Amino acid sequence: MKCVKIVASLLLIGSISVNTQAQKPVYQDETRPIEERVEDALKRMTLEEKVAMCHAQSKFSSPGVPRLGIPENWATDGPHGIRPEVLWDEWDQAGWTNDSCIAFPALTCLAATWNKDMSLLYGRSIGEEARYRNKNILLGPGVNIYRTPLNGRNFEYMGEDPYLSSKMVVPYIQGVQENGVAACVKHFALNNQEVDRHTVNVVVDDRALYEIYLPAFKAAVQEGQAWAIMGAYNRYKDQWACQNQYLLNDILRGEWGFDGVVVSDWGGVNNTEQAIYHGLDMEFGSWTDGLGEGASNAYDYYYLANPFLKLLRSGEVKEEEVDKKVRNILRLAFRTTMDTKRPWGSFVTPEHAAAGRKIAEEGIVLLQNKNNTLPIDLNKVKKILVVGENAIKPMTVGGGSSSLKAKYEVSPLDGITERMGAQAEIVYARGYVGDPTSEYNGVKLKRDLHDSRSAAELIAEATTLAKDADMVIFIGGLNKSDNQDCEGNDRKHLELPYNQDKVITELYKANSNLVVVNISGNAVAMPWVNQVPAIVQTWYNGTESGTALASVLVGDVNPSGKLPFTFPVKIQDNPSSSFGEASYPGIDKVQEYKESIFVGYRWTDKEKIKPLFPFGYGLSYTTFQYGKVTADKKEVAADGNISFTVSVKNTGATDGAEIVQLYIRDVKSSLPRPVKELKGFEKIYLKAGEEKTVSFTIGKEALSFFDDKKHEWIAESGDFEALIGASATDIKSKVSFKLK
């Protein structure tokens, strides 16, 4: 009897697939508008099929409707690479031999490029990898604001400034979705720490919410046309973000008109009724195991599974509630898996590796370069000592859900040896031992990092070798272990771990020709900053990490990255740490953002705090000269635009790129405003001696603040200034203008 049912089902599917164009059901006819197809498919579905689409069926998939030929949805962790396959019901690796991916740079690196073209390249490349693996939801990018340098997950995000994040996220989304893969922007919203992330209730004023924490999400929805949004773990207004009336219904769908699908973070749902009514569409990863219900299939006992179905069957919940969710899920299917023009993608290609390398090279930031220590002159430097665990430690493994099984990863030491080894002797010393045991969900390091020597022995070896070297390159920083740059917990302090400050200090005493390379996704304290001649900030740069670093160190590539967040001298200089535990990490699971809109450079400007390195800062191997900024008018109408123009000349002997930054200052406002705010940036490439003109055009939006009493954006008439800078503290010139 079972065989008869199976055959009948197959015949039904077959009969649909071979119909002529005229007979084809509306939902299968790609010439019809998507909304017509959605409604046609919806009316053909049973109640049970509708509910099934609203929750997971495995760790990373949710059901389609086989009877109607509607495919399953398959999600994959991003946003830095396509994670390896896991078992159906387990987090353990499935043991595939063909799922090793290209690891792309972390999004802190992408943000540090300040280059929208790099963002599009990134999105297209990772989208092709996702499509080849037949995923239709990429769980990324992340755009949560960098509120504290202690947040363990900052490396996955795009920095402290809402404008920079907004402009960088849009091309990424467009690139991913060109491949018929939905970008799932996360984590919406206010997920700015890992401490108590499943329980903390964030208290934030509406000005900060709308001016700081929402703009990148809004740009993702309205400019990037993102097809999916992932809710956050934390609470806001005492409701979990994955089932939040204010965030999901009032703002996301009501104010912004989002027509995509809202998915939960894995295990982010906590209540059936709120999940039904407060804007969630698809539930993934909830921790229910079904055992309490006497059943083995955990997925049937998710909040939007059997409990939802029971309420619908009894009439306590109207069918229109499940229809709202299924419309969004069907829309996702028609945009991805049911689009017959969807490209096929590609996987682990030389082109993708080259894209990752290019992004990494553009994102590396030169922080300090006294006496032109860099680039390394291999005609003079014949013996180089490389010191530090991060020179040999793979960084694609660990960090939480962004951990990857990379096809390969070029370590910094390997990159330096490959590029410089033919012209100089490369010697390595460990210097310190951090965490030799990195592993995540079955992906393990291929290099044994265990070392039984004492800290004193390791330093003694490094300093002895340093005395005999022409140059010392220390490669350290953070890693992706717990309590560092890692999902699940925050850092304990701003200082470097594993006694690295001591190692750096002793190396400098032994050889002052020292370069410090910091690998991290967060700011770190640098008590040795006044001694060390050269400092390079690099990131978790993936497959071609070491190659990109070496190319910058020797000058094959002129560094052009700039910081997407402020480096404070000490943790107390960061606003979230300036108001006691109530502000960070919270007291009794309640946290108040007491600094309000004054995040990052907005805070250091307001409090006149000198940062270690400011937002937007980065050096080059060449020099740039700025002209005086001019405006095309002195007064602008409320419905008009104003343009600013400035010339920039490469006055050095080396080709290079400069990031020109536009900040706007409201001279006098009825409400407190930042001293200045980023409202434009452009990365320009200049040959030695070349000069270019850069123009920015802004309108009322760039002059507005959010009035939380009126719940609207306001641009007040009066005096403004446009400031052109090479960083938040290096303002080259300014021009005044009025808003009518």
Image: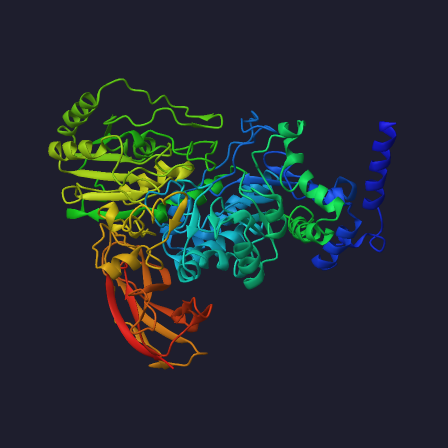
The quadrant in which the C terminus is found is: bottom left
In this rendered view, identify the residue nearer to me: 651 or 626: 626
**The furthest residue to the left:** 509
* Residue found 56% across the figure and 24% down from its top: 95
Above or below 219: residue 377? above
In this rendered view, identify the residue nearer to me: 445 or 215: 215
Q: Position of residue 124 (x, y in %)?
A: 52, 49
The quadrant in which the N terminus is found is: top right
Q: Position of residue 104 (x, y in %)?
A: 44, 41
Q: Quadrant of residue 642?
A: bottom left
Q: Is residue 400 left or right of residue 294?
A: left
Above or below 150: residue 166? below
* Residue found 18% across the figure and 36% down from its top: 381
In this rendered view, identify the residue nearer to me: 404 or 216: 216
Identify the coloring. rainbow
Residue 379 visible to an observer of this rendering: no
Q: Position of residue 513 (x, y in %)?
A: 15, 38
Number of numbered discs: 0
Above or below 714: residue 128? above
**The furthest residue to the top:** 452
Residue 90 visible to an observer of this rendering: yes
In this rendered view, identify the residue nearer to me: 485 or 529: 485
Q: Is residue 7 left or right of residue 164?
A: right
Q: Is residue 93 left or right of residue 2?
A: left
* Residue found 25% across the figure and 57% down from its top: 604
Q: Position of residue 379 (x, y in %)?
A: 20, 38
